[in-house]
Amino acid sequence: ALVAKAFSLKANEASPEPFSLPRGVAFISLSEIQAPRIPEFDEVKDKIKTEMVEGEALKRARTTALELSALARKEGLEKAARSLGLVRKETQGLVSRGSTFGDLGSSVTLDEDVFGLAEGSLSDPIRVSDGYAVVRVEEKHSFDPEAFAAQKASLVSSLEAAKKDRLF
């Protein structure tokens, strides 16, 4: 919606409504419209070089993650990470959907991949913002309808209070 709105604006026009993003809100305005053109090589050579270096680094990271995953299935994650000179990290307790996975950050893809794993299982390499990760699910708690029923009234009350505060 944000990109569609940006392309519908005229020069020096701002969108009056904010756009919700996973990590906040965005306000957009269009300062100028440039005609489509093919940029000169000198304008893009640094960007091309950076993209090529990053692309190669991602390929190596994926290869290392595949090697780690295969080795971890045989020897265990701790031993496999140590033998490849990698750092193994754990989250500080349970992680819920939409929250960060320590240094890995947060993304919809990461949530889908990790929460789709069975307890005690090891993932294939998962693409994260800085490269690739191999994740092992140690413990998994599923939805408990009885606990939800017990907490539902207080949850509804707090949500209603928050809405009233925003309204006022």
Image: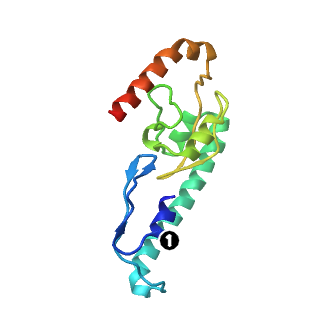
Nearest the eye: 112 or 25: 25
Percent from the top left, x then y, of residue 68? 59, 45
- On screen, residue 97 versus residue 121, left or right, reads left
Residue 145 sits in quarter: top right
Nearer the observer, 144 or 153: 153
Splitting the image into 4 quarters, where does residue 135 fall? top right
Estimate the x, y position of residue 48 in percent, counting from the top left. 46, 75
Task: Give neighbour class at mark 1: few <14, some 14-19, many 20+ (Cα, 10 Å).
Answer: few
Q: Work out whether residue 161 or residue 110 is closer to the camera in this orientation and state it.
A: 161
User: At 42% across and 74% down in the image, what residue appears?
Assistant: 47
Q: Is residue 22 above or below residue 98?
A: below
Relative height, residue 24 to residue 157 (above, below): below
Q: Write the residue at 37% across / 57% down.
A: 27
Residue 80 lies, in percent from the top left, at 57, 39
Amino acid type of disc 1? Met
Label 1: which secondary element:
helix
Q: Give the residue at mark 1.
A: 52
Q: Is residue 129 above or below residue 168?
A: below
Residue at 43% across, 25% down = 160
Residue lying at the far front of the rendered structure? 168
